[in-house]
Image (tube, grey):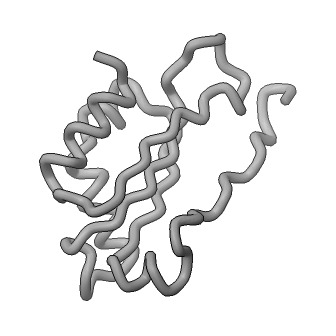
Amino acid sequence: MTVASVIEQKLLDAFQPSHLDVINESNNHNVPPGSESHFKVVIVAKAFENERLIKRHRLINSVLSQELAEKIHALALHTYTEKEWQEQYAGNAPSSPNCLGGGK
């Protein structure tokens, strides 16, 4: 199973999101081809209602604690309630910044 698949399954099981994207952004960084170390997660879930951003991120970090300790170098989180997603982003999450390290 790929790291991206594990992340996706764990987040689906934990949050039952209405929207989930797990994007491997490793190719934007100075890592070997085929790496799975840098990810962006866009997740819309009822569990985030009335929760501050830091709490949302802690919830996800808790679910992915093993992957963060062993396999993931960077994890960009975009966490939304259904209302936030519809009103602010309408399906267009913010882009990740370009890598500034490692000669790229």
Q: Position of residue 102 (x, y in %)?
A: 78, 27
Query: For this view, does 30 lie left or right of residue 63?
Result: right
Residue 47 located left or right of residue 21: left
Q: Is residue 4 positioned above or below 13 on the image?
A: above
**Residue occupying the far top of the picture:** 33
Left or right placement of residue 29 versus residue 55 in this view: right
Position of 9 relative to 103 (above/below):
below
Q: Residue at x 34, y 66 (%)?
A: 44
Residue 61 or residue 11, whichever sits in front: 11
Residue ID at (75%, 40%): 99
| Image position of 19 with respect to 101: above or below | below
Residue at 31 percent of width and 37 percent of height: 7
Residue at 38% across / 30% down in the picture? 4
Q: Residue reaching furthest left?
A: 13
- The quarter holding residue 50 reads bottom left
Q: How many marks?
A: 0
4 is higher (above) or lower (below) than 51: above
Task: Point out the image quarter for the C terminus.
Answer: top right
Relative depth, front residue between 84 and 71: 84
Indicate the quadrant where residue 95 lies: bottom right
Direction from residue 41 to residue 48 in the image, left or right: left
Taking depth in this image into account, of 47 and 62 the one nearest to the observer is: 47
Tell me residue 43's x, y (percent): 37, 59
Q: Quadrant of the N terminus?
A: top left
Q: Residue 23 location in percent, x, y?
A: 50, 39
Q: Position of residue 83 (x, y in %)?
A: 37, 85
